[in-house]
Amino acid sequence: MTKKKTGKGRKNPKRGLKPSSAIFELRLYIADHEINSRKAVELVQKFCSRYLKDNYSLTIIDVFQDYQSALRDNVLVAPTLIWLKKDTPAFLMGRFEWSDLLDFFGLSEATGGEK
Amino acid sequence: MKKKPKKLEKIPTYINGLDNILEGGLPKNRATLVLGSPGTGKTNLALEFLYRGASDNEPGIFLGFEETKESLKQNALSFGGDLDALEKNNKLFIIEGRLNPETLVSGKFSLKPLLSIISHKAQEMKAKRLVIDALDVLLQLLEEPFAVRSELHYLNHWLSQQGLTTILTLKPREDGSRLQDFFMSMADCAIVLDARVLNQVTTRRLRVIKYRGSSFGRNEYPFIITDKGLQTIPITSIELKHKPFSSRFSTGIPRLDRLLDGGIYRSSCTLIAGEPGTGKTLLTTTIIQEACRRGEKAVYVSFEESDQAIINNVRSAGLELEPYVKSGRLHFITAMPEATGAEEHLLNLMEAVEKVKPQHVVIDAISACARMGGTQAAYEYLMRALNLLKEKGITIILVNQTSGSREQLELSGIGISSMIDTVIFLSYVHGEGETNRTIQVLKSRGSAHSNQIRECIISNKGIEIIDAYVGEAGVLTGTARKVQEVRDRLTQLRQEALLKSKELELARVKAVMEAEMKRLQAEIENLTTELKTLKMEQEISQEECRKRQLIREYEKNPQASSAAKRRK
């Protein structure tokens, strides 16, 4: 089950960790229908639409379907969110929460979607 | 003795000696836990298990959370393993589980992705073996103990379905005892590794603490990591199957052969003990030279002198070892005991034994073995060396340097006396202004032997054994012996002379007596004769008297006298 939800550009994850034209290229690795994974998907989608607007691409990868991508991205635990930044990709793993996502992207509530 | 469980299948690790301890290998398709602090060789063991398996057509997957692929490959190269080639042939797959430094970790997560990767990959390459190295590194990030437990439950369940023989490695943590407990209950087999520094020498040890459904060697086994990989020689897995003694060989010293009732038994163990300078090495090399002369081979382990020093030293006593070294009949191993651990010493010895295939092995001196890292290390080294050598039917000569008086002497040194069949004790006897060497056979299993002290003389013709003086004055050697011998001879001569003179005197008295007897006899005879003569004279004179009377009567009355005469 590989869901792809894109704001602007859509990228094939098999190309590897290369930044695309979208400012925020994200990959979310999940494990099947595990509760933490389901929560993570909801949370990330909500977060993206609120803060990143149309300026992102999010690929959701289920490791049970596509282990090769996980292997290539060196993702061994779920959920893991990867932000393909220009220089090095950043990883966020575990049962992250709203505040973790803000930290991860270097945002704060003030600069966020309240605008 | 060992029953083979029918249900439990094992797969060999192909690691030297380990399969002996595990009585066949690791439990097939089950998890084995390898516990050990950093630097004890966990990763090496696991990697070698995979490497040897993959080389034997059992593909494997390595998942490591600590080391990079590069450092693993370096590790493997140290035991001659080429991981690249195996990777290329799809026999080995390495997953680097090290976290990206940019990673932010937040709370609970599941290990499913990595398990998914492994199952898929395992199917794809038909893997049979799996190593998960230092999973605790990842699990530490799961702060909640409950989360750890649930992930491990899942891992356990998953492992049981994979058909992979697995090694999990774990560092024991003081605070992580629960984690360790859980790992322990998950695994069907558990091996503990540790590295201890004793007297500046590191000894690695391995111990199997659990093996469901199988027996195993329960002791601690020392092991080393060499260029051939992990090596261990289990001490108790060596069964006592020494051959009984049969034939003897000559020591090269005829008198010593006689003391030993015909020589030294083949495949026996002889201890030559004595104080420094009593001729231990000389006696040993004499025996070895004689063996080489007969065409036999020997390995000489010297912990105290270099091979050249030994060769030169014994040359002054007329021994020439050099030709035998050149022809390969005599092989020296010289090493400082503290240079390596006991395990490496043992392996060096056993390697030389494999190569040379000797009939004799000398260890000079066992007293130096304690410098390998304590008495325990020395004991293990010797016990195992002796066992292995005896099993091969090799004759062993141990040299032991002793000090102090004979009474307080622990002859065999490091508690191996049960392994020793013959003890030859060399000693000094201090005399008047000189010191002399003595030799004594203190123990000789399976043969009559003289237990008397003999004097041992070292000259340029080698060792010569002569009878020591054993008499009223005790045991004497050297000049004292000679003096005493002369003294003894004089005493004897004096006694002999005295006896002879008494005999002569007796004879003389007897002769005097006889002479006196003869004289008296003669006197008796004289007197008897005189007496007879006197008696005869008396008779004659009486007759004359009577005749004269008759004549007188006739002159007075001739008729009457003639008538009387007629009447008569």
Image: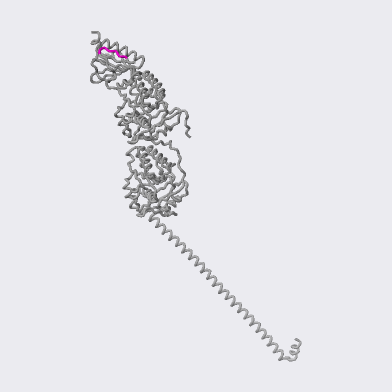
Front position in the image: B356 or A97:
B356
Q: How is the image coloured?
A: one colour
Residue range of the region highlighted in magenta in the rendering: A3-8
The image quadrant that residue B558 belongs to is bottom right
Q: How many marks?
A: 0
- Does the segment drawn in magenta span residue B254? no
Main SS class of the magenta portion in the image: strand
Q: Residue at x 31, y 27 (%)?
A: B67
Q: Is residue A5 magenta?
A: yes
- Residue B371 rendering spot, x and y as whole percentages: 34, 39
Judge whether B353 appears above or below B37 on screen. Answer: below
* The quadrant where residue B198 appears: top left
Residue at the extreme top of the image, as rendered: A115
**Above-or-below relation of B354 to A53:** below
Give the answer, above or below, for where B181 lies relative to A114.
Answer: below
Name which quarter of the figure residue B397 lies in.
top left
Q: Position of residue B254 (x, y in %)?
A: 42, 53
Q: Quadrant of the C terminus of chain A?
A: top left
A104 w.r.t. B474: above or below: above
Image coordinates for residue B425, horizontal then vertical, percent = 41, 48
Q: Position of residue B80 (x, y in %)?
A: 32, 34
